[in-house]
């Protein structure tokens, strides 16, 4: 009798897993379908891309990509890479010791400190736009990529501290005590003991900060002009009074999205480990 119950239970579990797996595939396809549609449209001519209803069997061409690269996007892409990479590096350098202090060596009223960090993200971005613009104008910092680096660092720092604190709280205290007994300094402990343990968490926090910095548009649109223009701002230039060139916009969107996709694909294992750290004991 018990064997029959076991068999029935196993069949139910397999059936439930099959249904959940099917739902996961459906949701995944729904998320990827717009990207695939944009990719297909980028290989169509402007005439075929503008057809309604769309022609899926239209001939493929690289005219949209050629038109995009002819506009000279490289300075804007270089500015985005510079602002995103440098701000992410600064965020990790600042957030790592701060998260260590809030988790392994907690300061007094550390919960208030964490709430203060998160409260900075509750302010609407547009509310701080005018003061930042006036300040940048007064110090001659408009249209400067270093202004974006400072802004992106301050914007992403609270999220990185919050994430890294949850990762660092999983580090065994015994390992830190052993390092202290061996005479390791705080900097040596952070660099050689703690950092290798929480590498997945650092990678996931860095990737999220990089994505947020790369995709930011509002501050870059208002505070930059031609010198420090970023890739998202460059994309907005394709919406003109002459109309919307759909194939060209799709090609530009694919190219601009490639750095984020490459970074996510390269760090996908670390990202999954970091985001799931502490979820299962």
Image: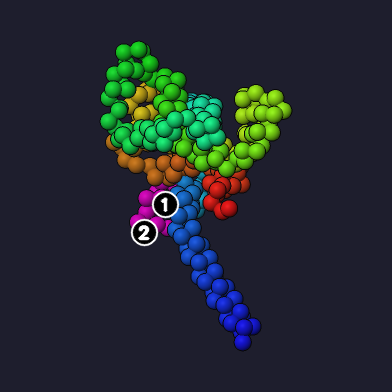
Task: Kindly identify the residue that appears in the image at 61 percent across and 79 percent down.
Answer: 6
| Front residue (pair 281, 198) | 281
Q: Position of residue 98 (x, y in %)?
A: 50, 29
Q: Position of residue 23 (x, y in %)?
A: 48, 65
Residue 72 visible within the image: no
- Image: 75 above or below 28: above
Q: Secondary structure at mark 2?
A: loop
| Front residue (pair 236, 218) | 218
> What sort of colour scheme is used for the picture?
rainbow
Callouts 1 and 2 close, C-beta under 8 Å: no
Residue 17 visible within the image: yes
Circle 1 crowding by C-alpha within 10 Å: few under 14, some 14–19, many from 20: many
Q: Nearer the viewer, mark 1 or mark 2?
A: 2
The prevailing secondary structure element of the residues shown in magenta is loop
Q: Earlier in the sequence, mark 1 or mark 2?
A: 1
| Front residue (pair 186, 28) | 186
| Residue at the disc numbered 2 | 53
Locate the N terminus and report the quarter of the image it occupies. Answer: bottom right
Gap in angstroms between the C-alphas marked 1 and 2: 10 Å
Q: Position of residue 55 (x, y in %)?
A: 42, 58
Residue projecting furthest to the top: 139
Residue 51 among those drawn in magenta: yes
| Residue at the disc numbered 1 | 48
Query: Image check: 228 left or right of 61?
Result: left
Start-end of magenta stretch: 44-58
Task: Kindly identify the residue that appears in the image at 62 percent across and 41 percent down.
Answer: 172
């Amino acid at each position: 009798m018990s064997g029959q119950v076991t068999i029935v239970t196993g069949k139910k579990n397999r059936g439930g897993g099959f249904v959940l797996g099917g739902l996961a595939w459906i949701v995944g396809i729904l998320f990827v379908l717009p990207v695939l549609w944009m990719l297909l449209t980028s290989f169509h001519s402007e005439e075929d891309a503008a057809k309604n209803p769309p022609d899926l069997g239209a001939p493929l061409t690289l005219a949209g990509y050629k038109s995009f690269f002819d506009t000279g996007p490289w300075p804007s892409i270089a500015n985005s890479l510079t602002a995103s990479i440098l701000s992410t590096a600064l965020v990790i350098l600042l957030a790592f010791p701060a998260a260590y202090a809030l988790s392994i060596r907690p300061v007094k009223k550390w919960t208030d400190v964490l709430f203060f960090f998160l409260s900075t993200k509750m302010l609407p971005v547009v509310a701080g736009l005018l003061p930042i613009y006036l300040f940048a104008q007064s110090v001659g910092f408009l249209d400067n990529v270093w202004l974006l680096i400072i802004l992106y660092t301050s914007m992403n720092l609270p999220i990185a501290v919050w994430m890294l604190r949850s990762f660092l709280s999983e580090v065994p205290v015994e390992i830190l005590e052993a390092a202290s007994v061996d005479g390791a300094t705080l900097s040596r402990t952070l660099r050689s003991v703690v950092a290798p343990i929480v590498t997945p968490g650092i990678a996931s926090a860095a990737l999220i900060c990089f994505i947020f910095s790369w995709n930011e548009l509002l501050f870059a649109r208002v505070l930059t002009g031609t010198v420090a223009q970023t890739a998202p701002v460059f994309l907005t230039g394709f919406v003109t009074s002459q109309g919307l060139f759909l194939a060209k916009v799709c090609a530009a969107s694919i190219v601009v999205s490639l750095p984020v996709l490459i970074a996510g694909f390269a760090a996908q294992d670390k990202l999954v480990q970091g985001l799931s750290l502490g979820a299962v004991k």
